[in-house]
Image (spheres, rainbow, N blue to C red):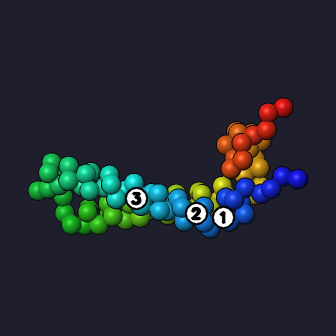
Amino acid sequence: MATMPTQSAYPWKATLRTVLAVVVALGIVGPLILGVITEQLGNYISPDVMGYIAWGVGLIVAISATVTRIMAIPQVNAWLTKWLGLGATPKANA
């Protein structure tokens, strides 16, 4: 009997791992991008635009978490495994 992949058995853990990964990645890359934007366009960017950038980063995290949560649904995981070979458990070779 096949066991359920951990992403499907504990979908919120998979979601939180994705949130952590995206936040860490944006935490590393974000300041570099912000530095370049500020250096190149600092005189032309209003604080409102910087606020929109911050909202955009939050939106990226939220969308990533939502997609991960959807992919952890057992039926979606089964579809990903069967048709794309991208499920939490590799597609079995026939």
Query: To which residue does mark 3 refer?
Result: 24
- Residue 55 quadrant: bottom left
Residue 47 location (% of width, % of height): 21, 66
Distance, label 1 to label 3, CA atoms, is: 20 Å
Residue 31 location (% of width, % of height): 26, 56
Residue 1 location (% of width, % of height): 88, 53
- Compared to residue 85, the image places residue 8 above or below, namely below
- Compared to residue 10, the image places residue 22 above or below, namely above
- Residue 6 quadrant: bottom right
| Residue type highlighted by circle 2 | Thr
On screen, residue 49 versus residue 24, left or right, reads left
Q: Is residue 20 visible?
A: yes
Say which label, 3 or 2, has the lower sequence index: 2
Instruction: Tell me which residue sits at (70%, 39%) in the image.
Output: 84
- Mark 1 lies on a secondary structure that is helix
| Residue type highlighted by circle 1 | Pro
Most extreme residue toward the left is: 43
Instruction: Tell me which residue sits at (62%, 67%) in the image.
Output: 12
- Compared to residue 62, the image places residue 71 above or below, namely above
Query: Dot 1: within a 10 Å radius of its alpha carbon, few (fewer than 14), some, or many (20 or more) residues?
Result: some
Most extreme residue toward the top is: 94
Query: Dot 2: within a 10 Å radius of its alpha carbon, few (fewer than 14), some, or many (20 or more) residues?
Result: many
Circles 2 and 1: CB distance less than 8 Å? yes
Query: To which residue does mark 1 refer?
Result: 11
Query: To which residue does mark 2 refer?
Result: 15
- Mark 2 lies on a secondary structure that is helix
On screen, residue 59 versus residue 32, left or right, reads right
Most extreme residue toward the right is: 1
| Residue type highlighted by circle 3 | Val
- Residue 81 quadrant: top right
Distance, label 2 to label 1, CA atoms, is: 6 Å
